[in-house]
Image: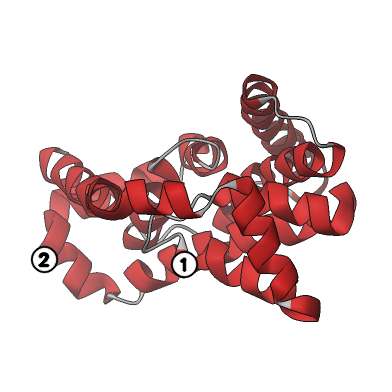
Amino acid sequence: MKRLFVIFLLLAILVIVPFLIWGGWFEESMSMEKTVAELRAAGTWAWAVALGLLVVDVFLPILGTVVMSALGLIYGWFWGGILSGIGSVSAGVLAYGITRKLGRRATRWLTGEEGLAEGERLFSSELGGWLVALSRWMPVLPEVIACMAGLARMHFGRFFASLCAGSFPMGFVFAWIGATGEQRPVLALALSAGLPPLIWGAFRFFHRKVVGNV
């Protein structure tokens, strides 16, 4: 468990360091006005540029919520929300895939036998799905939790479902903010934090009743 926690801290540091180095520059260059102007300059490919930015957020301190709001302003709350959700899910799948590709032997070397077993137990449990879903609206944690899920070889179906449950509510909330021209970060935070557990809980209830355990 201790070694698994160390891996978590190392992943968190890897995510935080780019923020410390380039975060200020990204914050200045990615204001809402500049982001919208740059996306509109891309013409019909604005959606592709925005998706690229959301995916690159795995490696660089991109202000994902600003990109999502810009998508809402350009494409409206519905399509902006769809695109935002797709971008967030794509980033999560990329982080998950990269660490899962390391293979079991490399993961065991990183985490140790006990750490690997603990990680597998965590992400195969109810808590694992909740962690993935709820982490999407928090800073730093989305990339770290997705990487940890990949290291622990979390079942992809469970991971993908919980990832969508967290990503699309946030995408629609910030797209709505951009589309309506409202700047309400507190409201956005409340909605994006409250919707994922409701959606993931509903999914788990439905899956148990109709399909059985994931």
Look at label 1 and name its amino acid. Val
Q: Nearer the viewer, residue 8 or 178?
A: 178
Does the image show residue 65? yes
Q: Quadrant of residue 140?
A: top left
Q: Which residue corresponds to the image point at 22% horizontal and 51% vertical from the top-left?
A: 17
Please rate how many residues cluster around mark 1, counting C-alpha atoms within 10 Å: few if below 14, some from 14 to 19, many from 20.
Answer: some
Look at label 2 and name its amino acid. Trp
- In the displayed structure, 60 sits above or below 124; it is below
Q: Nearer the viewer, residue 121 or 102?
A: 102
Q: Secondary structure at mark 2?
A: helix
Q: Which residue corresponds to the image point at 19% horizontal and 43% vertical from the top-left?
A: 9
Name the spot of residue 25 as percent of width and height, x first. Answer: 36, 53
Q: Which residue corresponds to the image point at 46% horizontal and 60% vertical from the top-left?
A: 57
Q: CA distance from mark 2 to mark 1?
A: 28 Å
Residue carrying label 2: 109
Residue carrying label 1: 56
In the image, 97: left or right of 22? right
Please rate how many residues cluster around mark 2, counting C-alpha atoms within 10 Å: few if below 14, some from 14 to 19, many from 20.
Answer: few
- In the displayed structure, 62 sits above or below 125; it is below
Q: Secondary structure at mark 1?
A: helix
Quadrant of the image for the N terminus?
A: top left
Q: Which residue corresponds to the image point at 43% horizontal and 71% vertical from the top-left?
A: 97
In the image, 25: left or right of 33? left
Q: Are marks 2 and 1 in contact (CB under 8 Å)?
A: no
Does the image show residue 157? no
Q: Nearer the viewer, residue 13 or 184?
A: 184
Label annotation for residue 14: none
Name the spot of residue 208 as percent of width and height, x first. Answer: 73, 40
Tally of numbered discs: 2
Q: Quadrant of residue 183?
A: top right
